[in-house]
Amino acid sequence: MGSMKEICASGRLLVTLSSLLVPLASCGAAPTGEKEPAPAPADAGFRTEALAQFEEPWAMDFDDATGILVVTERGGTMKLRLPDGRIGEVNGMPKVAYQGQGGLGDVQFAPGQAGPGDTLDGRTIYLTWAEPGDGDTRGAALGRGILACSTALACNLQGLEVIWRQQPKVTGSGHYSHRIAFSPDGKYLFLSSGDRQKMTPAQDLDSNLGKVLRLNLDGTPAAGNPFASKGSPADQVWSYGHRNVLGLAFDAQGRLWDLEHGPKGGDEINLIEPGKNYGWPLVSDGDHYDGKPIPRNATRPDLAAPAITWTPVIAPGTFIIYSGDMFPAWKGQAVIGGMKPNVLVRVAFDGTSAREVSRTPVEQRIREVEQGPDGAVWLLEDGAKPEGGRLLRLTPEAEQKPPR
């Protein structure tokens, strides 16, 4: 393998991982008195291409009609990557509160868009970012705008309108969450709103912190939300009792799942259902960072239980539920990027529960996972150049057989 300087100069790296991978023990937490689960094996091998590098990338999304990829960088810039590898930039980004975990966040193309040509001109996109407030306060914001592109590599974001904000803005710079997922029918926007490291607002319906929200595409509360009768902001809320949700994804059955950071232990995947309380900070399968214990999920059967938890943590970046044909053995499974340790984790769903089926070491922390239009799996490494920030494309090294 060449040096990082050589990799950046060539712009393309092809690595076969099968000879580099070693199994790591599964860190799924076992109930008290039960044996730890058997170690999850590493995947047998896939080919990894490094196709570009970015500065602290946080999210990406494909425009299916053109194959153009948009990538957010936490410092406040958005880049374009064309299918031929050329890189451009989108101007007109909002001012972001770039500190701690804050900055430019998620990006998603509006559902149901298609158009001729080879540019993103006229596409509607949704963005999230950490927004400064009065004094020493900050909060997540969700905005919607339209791309105006003079060429495939030169776009401006026009008419950007903030359509939702975290309430209230608070001190600190962590746990914004601000991940976007559109419902399969394209009618609703689901948004994760973190607890902002304040914990108790997650149980308070007079705040939209620590919640998963269901909104109309214009950012207004969707009709039929479970707490609509309580007025604003409870009328936005789909579920509550969340800590720091960094992944939202729908499965083939139309069910919504989240991927959530625990405290010291207790990372989890949850099946998100309307009106349910997911327990934070009342319960967790982890403890506070100062060692103070938290009652376990199993002690409160009245609260929604996670489908799977991890102690020690995997510190997930985000995840997809894979639906492509390139990796048939992965179909219907969660593909998760881990940041502590640096791993790619696959999780299978069994009804309303889940189990880890593989854990593959990777070189750097994985911030973002995306499925490409052709079924390849794309990753964004967390961090700045030169060590981190690469855009990776995964394809099968050998024939993948579907599960029996």
Image: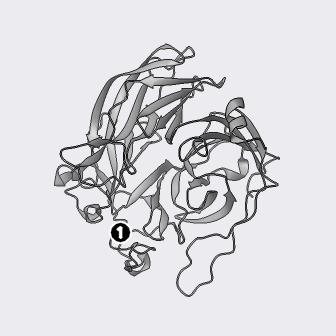
Q: Quadrant of residue 134?
A: top left
Quadrant containing the C terminus is bottom right
Q: Position of residue 117 (x, y in %)?
A: 56, 14
**Which residue bears the numbered disc 1?**
279
Q: Residues within 10 Å of mark 1 (few under 14, many from 20)?
A: many
366 over 285 or under it: above or below: above
Residue plotted at (44% across, 40% down): 74
Residue plotted at (69% across, 41% down): 4
Q: Quadrant of residue 163?
A: top left
Nearest the eye: 97 or 106: 97
Residue ranking furthest to the bottom: 33
Q: Position of residue 92 (x, y in %)?
A: 37, 24
Q: Position of residue 158 (x, y in %)?
A: 35, 21
Residue plotted at (55% across, 74% down): 29
Nearest the eye: 183 or 299: 299
254 over 125 or under it: above or below: below
Nearest the eye: 275 or 159: 159
Quadrant containing the N terminus is top right
